[in-house]
Image (cartoon, rainbow, N blue to C red):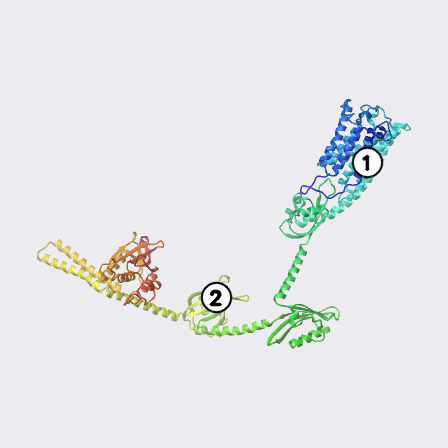
Amino acid sequence: MNPPPQRLGGSLPVGMAPAIPALVLAAQLVCAIVLCGWAFGMPGLAGIGTDGFLMQPLTAVGCSAIGIGILLGAASRRSAARWAMAVPLVIGCSSLIQEWAGVSLGMDRLLFADSVLHQTRPYPGRPGVLPALGLVLLALSALSLGSSRRALRRLTVVFACIAIAVAAISGMLLPLGISTPGPETRHALMSVPTAVTICLLAVGLIALRRQSAWPRQPDCGFGSATLQACLLLCVSLPVVSALAHFWVERSGAVSAEMIEIVQAVAQVALSCGLIAWAWMRIARESGARWAVNLALDSAPVAITDVDGRILRWSAGCERLYGWTSEQALGRFQQKLTGTPPIATSDIEALLAGARQEREVTAYRKDGTMLRVLHSSQAVQPRSDIAPMVVHAMTDITARTRAEHAMLASDARLSLAVDLHELGIFEWSLATDRFVFHGHAERLFGLEPGLFDGGIDAWKRHLRQTFGTSFRMPGPPEAWSAGRYGFRLVAVEAGVVKVVEGTAHIHRGPGENDVSMIGIVMDATQREQHAEMLKSRESELRSILETVPEAMITIDGGGQIRSFSTTAETLFGYAAAEVLGKDVRLLLPRYVRPSTDPALPGQGNPAITSITAGLDRNGNELPIEIAVGAANVGNERIAIAFIRNLREQMATQARLNELREQVLHASRVSAMGEMGAGLAHELNQPLTATSNLLGAIDLAMARGGDPEQVRCMLELARQEVLRAGSIIRRMRAFVSKGELEIRAEPLDEVIAETLQLARSRSRVPGVRLSYRPSVVAPSILADRIQMQQVLVNVLNNAFDALAGLNDRLPEITLSTRQLNDGHIMISVIDNGPGLPEAIINRPFEAFSSTKTTGMGLGLSICRRIVEAHGGRFSLRNVPDGGAAVEFTLPSYSELELRAG
C-alpha cells in the first residue's frame, strides 16, 4: 500500500499475512449467508439466530464490496480498490441522508423486495444508522490505507478502531439482553451478522496496516507485540466498560452513581496500568535503540533512498569524508563522495534482498583519495514508505596501499631477478634442505628440481663443478651470524664462467637454529667487460697521446685533470707541472661550461672559439679551442681540444699578400690593354689645346679682341685639365693600395668606368647603353676596385660580342634599388652566353673560355664584391646572351649628410 520509489517502482518483497485473506473470507461468508437467506425466503439466516434484528441486503452488499476492495488494495490494484469502495460509500451515505431527512429514495427495495417488506421496522431493506456509519468508516479506512499521503494513511487504524467499537457495543446489546428491539432503540442497535462482519473487516484493515507499519522484526522502532497489545487494550477496554455499564444499569442491582464511580476508577486504574506497562516497554526499547544508534553513529554508516539521496549521515561518515551532516543531507552520495553509482541491475538485486559489497575509490572533501570497502543492503522498515539503502563504509586506504606496495615490491623483486638473472637460495639446519629460486640452480650448475641433498652434498657439487667450495669455518652449528661473499670460477669448453654471490647466516635462539639465505649472480660478462674496458682504455690513451691537437681535461672547479703530449709541446709545460692547477694558467679567457643539458656534452656539438693562450714563457699563442662537456658520475668535466693557429695565420697572411699581387697584376694587365685607347683619348685634348694656342697666337698678332682671347685660353685650360684627369684615373687604377671604402656617387663611378671601357673597346659597332634607376643613390665602396670589377665584366662582354655578325651587338648596364637596402648592378649582353662549364663552376680559378685568359677575373670580382658585403652571380638570358649581376650596399642622402 506504499507509494513506489521514484526510480524503479518497487519495494522489498513482503508476503501478505495469512490472517488478512482469512478475515476477509470470513466476512464474505457471513455476507453470502445473509444474501442467501433473503434470496430463499429464510430471514433467520439474515439474523443468525436472532429474528428480531436482521442484516439488510444492502448492508451485506456494502460489506462484501469492502472485502473485495481490501483484497484488491493488498494486491496493489488501487484503482480497482477505489471503485469497489465507492459502493459502500454510496450505500452508507445515502442511508444516513434518508434517516436524517425521513424520506425514502427508492433504493430500499432494490434487492429482494418481497422478502424485506415482511419486516416490522420502518424503511426495511436499507442499513440502519449504525450499520451505515460502520460502512462509511470501513470505506474511509480502506481508502486512507491506499492514499499516497502519509497523514491520511495514519487515519486507517483510527477509522477501523471506531468501527470496531461501534459494532462491538451496538451488536452486543441484544445478545447480552441489555436492550430489546423496538422503535425507540433501533438507531442504537446493530444486528449480530452486521457487527461480526464489520469487526472482521476492521480487524483485516488493521492487520494490513500493521503489516506495513509494524513488522514483527523491525530494523528500527518498537516491536509488533508492544503496538498490538496497546491497540488491543485501547479498543477492548472502552467496549468492555461500556457494555458492563449498560448491563449493570439494566439489572438495577447497583445505583447509577456507584456504576459511574466504579467505571471511572476502573478506567483510571486500567489506563495507569497500561501507561506504566507501555512506559517501561518503551523505555527499554528506547534504551536499546539509543545504544544501537550510538554504535551506528560512531561507525561510517549512511542511509540513502534508492536514488542515492542521503537521508542519514553518521558521525563516522563525517570523520571519514569530511562533510558534516548538515552539508550531506539531501545530496546524492555518489556526487558527494565521488564513488561510482550503483548499476540498475544491482539495485534490483538489492531490492530482492541481496547484499552487495565492493571496493570503490572515494574522495574526501579536501580532494584526498580514499579506498573504501563499501557494503550496501536495502531495508524497508514499513511498507508504507519507500525502501532505503544502508551503506556501511570501511576505510581500507592504508591496507590497499600496503597491499599495492607489497605487490609492487614483489613485482620489482621478480623483475630484478629476471632481468639480472639472479638466483636466491635458502637452507636451514633443521631440515638440511636447499630451496632455490630464480636462476640459482642454473648458476650453480644443477639440474632443475633434481637436487635434494643437504649442505655437504652442495659443497661437494661446488667443488666438482668450480674446483672450490663455499668456505665457512667449522660445522654449520658453529657458524657465526653475518654476511659472507664468495666467488666461483669454472671453465666449460674453453669458456670461463664466473659466479659471485653473498650468503647471510642467521642464528636463532636455539642451539641448532641456524639458517642461510643467499643471492648469486653471473659475473662472467662483467669480467669480460672489465677486461675489454681496460683494453679500450689503453687503446684510447694511445690515440689521445698521438692526436695532432692538444687535449686538456678540466674538472668542474677549473682544475686540470689530464694534459696530453701535444699540449706539453704546445705550451712548453710538462704534464706533472700543470696537473691539479687552474686552467687559467694556460687559458686566461677560459669560461666554465654551463650545466644546462642543452649545451655541449649532451648530444650537442662542442663550442669552438678563437682565443689566445699563454706558453711557459708568458708569450701569447693564437689558438682555436673547442670545449665539450661530459658527466662522469656526479661530476661534470670539460674536454678542450686546442689547435695552434700560428702557422695557419702566417699562411693566411701570405695568401692575402699573393691575392693583392694578383689583383695588382690584373689591373696592370687591363691597363696595358687600354693603353692605345687612352693614348687616342689623350690625343684629343692635346690636339685641341694645340689648336687653341695657335688660334690665340694668330689673334694676338692681328690685335684681336682680348675677351675672345681669354675665352680661348679658358678652353685650352679645360682641355689640359681633362688630359690630367685622364692620366690621374689611369694612375689610380694601376696603383696598388689599401682598401678605402667610402660613400661614392654611383652614377659618377659608372660614368668614369664607361669612359675607360669605351676607350679600350676594339669591337666596332657595339652599342653600350646605361639605364640607371630613378633614384641615383650613393654606394659604400672603394671606387678603384668597383671600377676594376665593372671594367673586367664589360671587357668580358666585349670579348663575347667579338665576331658576332648575325645580330646587332649590344651591352646594357642597369641599376635597381632592392628592398634590403642594396643596389643591384646588371651587365647584360646579347652574345652567345656562358658555356655550361662556366655556369656550373663560375668562380673556379684558372678556368677561362679565352685562349690567352688566366681564368682569375670572375674569381677576383666575386671576392671584391663579397668583401664589400654584396653578392655576385652569373646566368644566361633566355633570348640569348649572358647576365652578370652583383649587389652593393647603398648609402642614402640622409646618411651621407649625417656622416
**Residue 772 coordinates in the image, percent (x, y):** 28, 54
Q: Residues within 10 Å of mark 1 (few under 14, many from 20)?
A: some
Q: Which mark is residue 26?
A: 1
Q: Amino acid at mark 2?
A: Gly
Can residue 418 be seen in the rendering of this structure?
yes
Above or below: residue 519 compared with residue 331:
below
Image quadrant assignment for residue 477: bottom right
In the depicted structure, whether residue 253 falls above or below residue 560 = above
| 887 shown above or below 83 | below
Quadrant containing the N terminus in the rendered view: top right
The C terminus is located in which quarter? bottom left
Q: Position of residue 594 (x, y in %)?
A: 49, 62
The quadrant in which residue 26 appears is top right
Which of the pair 44/153 is nearer the observer? 44
Q: Amino acid at mark 1?
A: Ala
In the rendered image, residue 24, in percent from the top left (x then y), is placed at 79, 36
Q: Please say if 74 is above or below 450.
A: above
Query: Secondary structure beneath disc 2?
Result: strand
Residue assigned mark 2: 628
Left or right of 525 in this view: 582? left
- Farthest residue in the left direction? 702
Frontmost of labels 1 and 2 is 1
Residue 177 percent across, percent down from the top left: 88, 29
